[in-house]
Image (cartoon, helix red, strand yellow):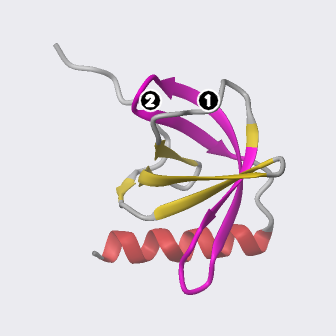
Amino acid sequence: MSTIERRRHPRYGCSNELEIEWGSEVLRASVRDISNSGMFISTTDPLWMRAEFSARIPLPQPLVLDCVVRRIEPGRGMGVEFKDLTPDMRKALDEYLWELAAG
């Protein structure tokens, strides 16, 4: 039995570390995959549905993205959607995705 793919953007696998800035807390996790519209964050302690936070991927030019939780996989992590990306954020994300796609 096949499943229907509902994603609008291709996802790219990666294993970057990630900092979740949530209020005054900084949580550590990792990125499992990322697309133009969101990513899956691997963590044993996901936030709850619709929780909003900033994610910081420590690259040579750090990538900081505002996110909202859209899906939770207990014990595995959470799927998040990017929100309110500025043109500079969008450009940095596009460059990062291009690097991942190039291999």
Which of the image's four quarters has the C terminus? bottom left
The residue depicted at 36 percent of the width and 61 percent of the height is 14
What percent of the width, then of the height, locates residue 100? 37, 70
Q: What span is colored magenta in the figure?
A: 53-82
**Residue 78 x %, y %:** 52, 35
User: Can you identify the residue that label 1 sits on?
Assistant: 70
Which residue lies at the image location 47% right of the left edge and 41% below the top edge? 43
Amino acid found under the numbered disc labelled 2: Arg
- Which amino acid, mark 1? Arg
Q: Mark 2 sits on what residue?
A: 6
Q: Quadrant of residue 6?
A: top left
Q: Nearer the viewer, mark 2 or mark 1?
A: 1
Q: Give the distance between the C-alpha atoms of the residues marked 2 and 1, in whole angstroms.
A: 14 Å
Seen in the picture, residue 22 relative to 64 is either above or below; the reply is above
Hey, which residue is sitting farthest bottom in the picture? 60
Q: Earlier in the sequence, mark 2 or mark 1?
A: 2
Left or right position of 33 against 46: left
